[in-house]
Amino acid sequence: MWRYVVTKVPPVLGNDQERWVFEEMQTRARGPWHVLESRRGEFRDDMMKDIGMVEAILDGRDWILGEPSLADFGISEDYRRFSPWVRRFRRRSRATRAWASRIQSLG
């Protein structure tokens, strides 16, 4: 998910300095901004595969590994953090919605 949204994050950051630092760190780690932006379609496709995999894992299960674990919290954090950008792409199956509710109820 991160590769898909990274170039869209700076506008929501607090100030110009924070945006500059964020972009500088990301381009050093991931490559030129324009290249990341030009590959968004590829990154979206990868993200959709990952979302589909999570939904398939949760089909008929309450938790990713059978019981609450760091896997659930790590994956659910990506769903929560990036929801403004990926909401329109998520299928959000009944199993995924129920899983997200269980995560929230654990705090």
Image: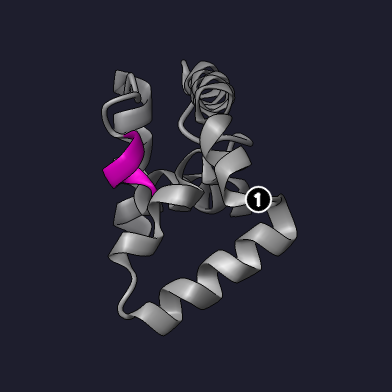
64 and 76: which is toward the camera: 76
Q: How crowded is mark 1: few (under 14 residues within 10 Å), some or many (20 or more)?
A: few
Q: Is residue 22 above or below residue 59?
A: below
Question: How does the figure colour the protein chain or chains?
Answer: one colour
Q: Nearer the viewer, residue 84 or 74?
A: 84
User: Is 83 located above or below residue 77 in the figure?
Assistant: above
Numbered disc 1: secondary structure: loop
Locate residue 19 relative to residue 45 in the image: left or right. Answer: left
57 left or right, relative to 12: right
Instruction: Give the residue at x 31% y 54%.
Output: 104
- Label 1 belongs to which residue? 32
Q: In this view, does 92 lie above or below 27?
A: above
Q: Is residue 64 visible?
A: yes
60 vs 19, nearest the viewer: 19
**Residue 87 location, x and y as percent?**
28, 33
Q: Report whether residue 68 is seen.
A: no
Determine the residue positioned at 34% across, 24% down: 89
Q: In which quarter of the image is the C terminus?
A: bottom left
**Residue drawn where x is 54% and y is 77% of the image:** 21
Residue placed most toward the observer, 10 or 44: 10
- Residue 90 on image: x %, y %: 35, 25
In the image: residue 30, left or right of residue 16? right
Q: Does the magenta stretch include residue 34?
A: no
Residue at horizontal 51 percent and vertical 53 percent from the top: 73
Asked where in the image residue 28 lies, by quadrant, the reply is: bottom right
Which x, y percent locates residue 38? 55, 31
Q: In which quarter of the image is residue 13?
A: bottom left
Q: What secondary structure do most residues of the magenta stretch adopt?
A: helix
**Amino acid type, mark 1:** Pro
Q: Residue 11: horizontal and vertical position, in percent? A: 31, 61
What segment is highlighted magenta in the picture? 82-86
